Image: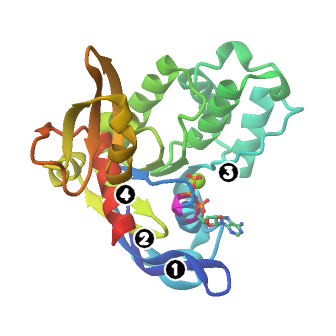
Amino acid sequence: MKIKITNLSKAYKRGFNVLKDINLELESPSMIGLVGPNGAGKTTLMKLLVSQLLPSEGNIMIDGMELYKNEKYLKQRLGYLPQEFGLYEELTVYQFLDYMAALKGIKENRKDFIKKCIVITSLEDKQDIKIRTLSGGQKQRVGIAQALLSSPELFIVDEPTVGLDPEERIKFRNLFSKNASSKLVILSTHIIDDVESICNRLIVMSKGRILFDGTPSQLIKSAQGHVAKIELHSSSEELVEKNFKITSRVIVPNGLSYRIVGEDLPASSEFITPSLEDAYIYCIMEGDMA
Ligand SMILES: Nc1ncnc2c1ncn2[C@@H]1O[C@H](COP(=O)(O)OP(=O)(O)OP(=O)(O)O)[C@@H](O)[C@H]1O
Ligand SMILES: [Mg+2]
């Protein structure tokens, strides 16, 4: 599968573009992490990709065809987990998945598909329970289960790991990465760990623009020389905060040890290898200054 996004802009209100001239090529097999601060435009981009919204300008091609004129082609290949997912609270897990499968037009082996998704998302003991009585994380799993129905070629998931406990999160990461071996998976997240462990490509967005598109290691490389450790008395913290982003602070015998990220770090600082999270923070800082 290949998706080509050209000069894409979106305004909800005339004159206020929340996506600004986005150009991207997305091709399977790939596992793409979409990250960025709240309001960056991640969900908007995903809604445009699943044709839930129409662009204000630009277009999207899917396998060489215009996406908005070939919705059926898209829908037959798409698994989508929206950020805000309305579940039918009065249905049981099984009834809900059966309903979603019907909407997706799955007729053959419907029961088998549903059972498989229930097992993958560890919902076996909840399948006959009403959705209303599930915990937040369990509801999230029902959302993931419906996106997996019919084993889609294109998998677009908006913050899928929100609310999952660590064990389930790791399980889902593995599930997504297994999927990516032949598919196109686009996942938005605020958990940099998720990206680090499974994505081969990372797209950083801020204020409707793409700040970075590349591999996680390329992003780390770009932050080299911009992350350091310094020890200071806590009274100097304000000065540090004014000039740099602090990504960690730990108490040490003579005060505090900070991990700082910034453009011009003091010459006396001890430079360290950036983590992906440091590199992400640096990328957003740079973007805000530009
Ligand atoms: N239905 C809407 N009507 C008007 N403005 C909207 C609408 N949906 C989103 N926006 C605005 O568009 C911008 C991008 O929002 P979007 O939901 O795409 O961000 P996001 O990157 O997904 O953020 P988050 O990390 O919080 O999920 C925000 O400024 C938001 O206020
Ligand atoms: Mg969002």
Residue 152 is situated, as x and y percent measured from the top left of the image, at 50, 48
Please give the range of residues in magenta: 40-44
- What is the distance, in whole Å, between disc 2 and disc 1 at their CAs? 10 Å
Q: What residue type is labelled 4?
A: Ile
The residue at the point 25 percent across, 19 percent down is 254
**Taking 286 as reference, is 13 above or below it?**
below
Which disc, if any, is residue 104?
3
Quadrant of the image for the C terminus?
Answer: bottom left
Q: Which amino acid does label 1 sit on?
A: Ser
Give neighbour class at mark 4: few <14, some 14-19, many 20+ (Cα, 10 Å). Answer: some
Quadrant of the image for the N terminus?
Answer: bottom left
Q: Is there CB contact under 8 Å for labels 1 and 4?
A: no
Q: Which amino acid does label 3 sit on?
A: Lys
Residue named by callout 2: 209
- What is the distance, in whole Å, between disc 3 and disc 1 at their CAs? 29 Å
Label 2 or label 3, whichever comes before in sequence order: 3
Label 2 or label 1, whichever comes before in sequence order: 1
Which circle, 1 or 4, is nearer the viewer? 4
The residue at the point 61 percent across, 34 percent down is 145
Residue named by callout 4: 284
**Residue 48 colored in magenta in the image:** no
Which secondary structure, mark 4? helix
- Residue nearer the viewer, 193 or 270: 270
Residue named by callout 1: 9
The residue at the point 33 percent across, 41 percent down is 277
Label 3 or label 4, whichever comes before in sequence order: 3
- What is the distance, in whole Å, between disc 1 and disc 4 at their CAs? 20 Å
Total marks shown come to 4
- Residue nearer the viewer, 52 or 19: 19
- What is the distance, in whole Å, between disc 3 and disc 4 at their CAs? 38 Å
Residue 119 is situated, as x and y percent measured from the top left of the image, at 57, 21
Which circle, 3 or 4, is nearer the viewer? 4
